[in-house]
Every structure is written in C-alpha cells, then in structure tokens.
Image (cartoon, grey):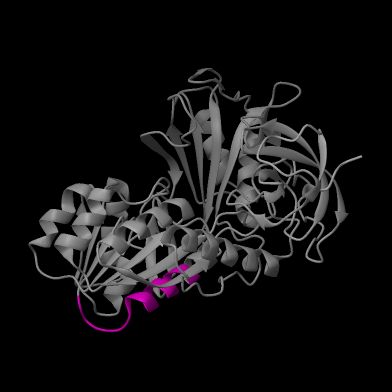
Amino acid sequence: MPRRSDQRPGRSPPSDRVVRLRIEELALDGDGMGRIGTYLVFVPGTIPGEEVEAEIGRRGESHGRAKLVRVLSPSPHRVVPRCRHFGDCGGCSLQHIEYAEQLRLKEAMVRSHLGHALRAEVPVRPALGLDDPFGFRNKVHFNVGRGAEGEAVLGHLAARSRRLVPVAECPVHADAGNRVAFRLGGLLRRFHVAPAEGDPPTRGVARHVLARVSEASGETQVVLVVCRDRFPGRDALAEAMLSGPGGATGVHLNLNDREGSLVLGRETIHLGGKDRLVEEIGGVQFLVSPVSFFQTGIRGARLLLGEVLSAVGEGGGPVLDLYAGVGLFALPLAKTGRPVVAVEENPLSVRDGIHGVKRNGLKGVRFVRARVEDQVRRLAGEGEFEVAVLDPPREGASEKVLRLVAGAIRPRRIVYVSCDLRSLARDLKLLATLGFRLRSAVPVDMFPHTSHVETVATLTR
C-alpha cells in the first residue's frame, strides 16, 4: 500500500517503489512536484493540487523522478488532451491542463522563480495567452526516422530521449505547415530517400523536415535537412514539392553532416520557388530566409512585440537593440520614429533585416553585423541610448555584456526579453547589483501546452 508523503519525513530517498503524493507546484520542465518529507519527487502528467500514486524510477540524493500510476484526486483543471500522441511524444507537456490554468501556472512559475532569485516580491503581471492555443506554430519541425519497413517517417522525440515517436498529427502546428511537411515525408518515401543514421550520420540522407507558413500571405516554405547534398531523386523531389495544389512556395536543402542535436547546418541550397517568405507583424513587413531566426508563432510574436513597444514607451530617444535577429523589435520601433541601432551576429538575419528596412521605407534604423560582446563598448562612444532592448538566446546575456550595458551604455531603461527563467533570474540578479531595478515582468505564452514561457522584464536605472 503506498504511503502518504507526510508519513515519511527526511531527505533520503524513500524505500517504497510506489508512493502517494500531493502535487504542490509545477516545475520549470512542466513536471508536477510533490514531497516525501523534504525529498522531492517529480511526476510528469500531473497538476498542482492533485493527489496521485507514482512509481519512482530514477532516485537522486535529494530528488527523484516518477511515472504516474493513477490520479487519486483529479484537479478540476484536468482535460482530455487533443493530440493522440500526447504522453509519448515529448513535444508538449501540459495538454492535460485547461489553457486558462496553464497561464495561471506560468505566471506563478515566473513569480516564484524570480522572487526566489531576487529575494523579494516581484511585480509580475498576469500571463498573456493566445485566443486559440492550437495551430499557432507557423514554424513546423519534424525529425526524420526509420519506420517499421525501413521507410522514412516523420515524428518528434520522446521526452528526455533520442527515441523517435512517429506521428500522424501535430495540433499545435499550423495546418498548412503540417500539410506541406507530411507531403514532403510522403515524397521521401516515394523517391526512396533514406533517413540518416548515426551521430555523426554515416548512412542515409534525411535528418529533419522544416516548414514555415506566412500568416500574412499563406505561403509555405519548406526545408529538408540532409547529411549529404547529392542523392538520387533530389531535383524530382523538389519539383514535386512545388507543383500542384498545396505545393510549397519555396523549397530549400540544408546540409548538416555534423555530430550533435543542432538541427541546421551552415550551408543552405535554394532548390526552387521563392527564396524568402514575407510576414507582417505590427504593420511592418519582414522578409524571412529559411534559416534566419524568426519567431515560431506569429500570434505570440504580436503579443510579445506589443509588450516590448509598451515597455520601451513613448518618446524619441534612441534605442539599442541587442541580439536583434531580423529586426522584430527594431523595425517597428523605427516606424514609431525612434532612432535604432540593431546588433546581430547572424549574417543571414542581418541581410533579411536590411531588406526589411528597405521594403518598409524606414529611416533611422541601422543594422550592425557583429557579436554583441564585441560591439557594445564601441557603441558606448556613439552617444546616449535612452533604452536598451536585449533578446539573447536561451543561455542569456554574458556578464560582460550586462556590465557594459549597465556601466558604459547606461540607458535609462532596459527591456530584457527572455525565453529561459533560469538565465533571466541570474541576469536580473546581476543587473540589480549594477543599479537597475525590476519594474515589471510580463509572461507571454509563446508556446501553449509546454512549460516554456517568454518573459518581458522592464528595468529602470
């Protein structure tokens, strides 16, 4: 008989294999967390407030991971997941929770994690969510693997695993993206293009299928990631992808023969159709190359941009946009009349950003292709920046960048956009020691049904 958590105090792992837990909160990876004394147990597929039975598998000194056996007292927020692959597929972790509760839990995650790091109450506003939490991913991604008969199949990886889960649907993807991706999967089988095997790949060809749908035009762009760029049927496959109803607007090949889990390689070959998509956000048109970084979901990007523009505020002072990408923030800010310097390392993103400036007839925005770490000190001598906008990768900004922004640039306000709470908490803690106070944090739900949360943090000097 499983024992209740309050019957087994202590930090050491419990001796029982199956335990009874009350789920207290949602961890950053989306698992529910309960306690046996002070020993933490993480259980996927659970909801705070539920009482469950769970079978503990991996046991560490202070915490363990368990598999849900059954829900003894279900949450009123538990719902039937829409996707048939939920639970096995690692793409979503929260489809069993009604969407309004997902938003509340993400707000609580931001409040708890930032408050713990800063050792203070933090001004967190309610999480901003999508009107429809399905079909929102304009960028579609599938892994290519080997099916039962050796054929190429599309799927996602299982949670915390490299095991491929073949899928027949993905409700969080845009319908048009799924259609062109699965069409490409069918053509891989028709033209006998084998999935890549090995790490680094030594056999086969296809590694990933990417597709992007323009919400503005409905056009679709597809990229086949391969480990070798020459293979039988390549040109016929591209022609078939471009032809007929429902065909892609542009087809590209990306060569990635390297070891590891990075999806894209350094070389991209345009096989046919248009070389870029046009997207529109905030009244600005963006040109997006197949491998340039651009937000995965356009509806979420609109929410994010609205919060950044609000945080920057009204006025005419110059803005420094670091890690600018193709200019998601820089171009709309320039449209408001503010002078903007946008710093971005990726040359393709800079090229797309410059084309976007010309396409929209914008003045007063300058793109600089450089590593942020190398450019910030140089920009400090060019005059004052009223606001600095930072949108770094998941690992956050380096200590060097934060010290230079705070000490050399010395903006009145910093708007920090983060997709990772751990790095955000670390960087806000450092900025506090450099004289910047957190004024507000707004969670933006760019990825419903996952534990990921984007946060727009506004700080003043």
252 vs 409, left or right, is right
Q: Position of residue 296 (x, y in %)?
A: 51, 55
What segment is highlighted magenta in the picture?
A: 303-317
The overriding secondary structure of the stretch rendered in magenta is: helix
Quadrant into which the N terminus falls: top right
Occupied quadrant, residue 384: bottom left
Q: Quadrant of the C terminus?
A: bottom left
Above-or-below relation of 83 to 227: below
Quarter of image, res 49 = bottom right
Residue drawn at the location 71% of the way across and 50% of the way down: 34
Compare residues 227 and 443 and report the one nearer the observer: 443
Q: Is residue 370 highlighted in magenta? A: no
Residue at 41 percent of width and 45 percent of height = 291
Q: Is residue 194 visible?
A: yes
What count of labels does the image hold? 0
The residue lying toward the viewer, choosing from 204 and 329, is 329
**In this orientation, does residue 172 appear?**
no
Q: What x and y, as percent, mark residue 438?
A: 37, 70
Q: Position of residue 342 (x, y in %)?
A: 24, 61
What's the residue at 55%, 28% (across, down)? 206
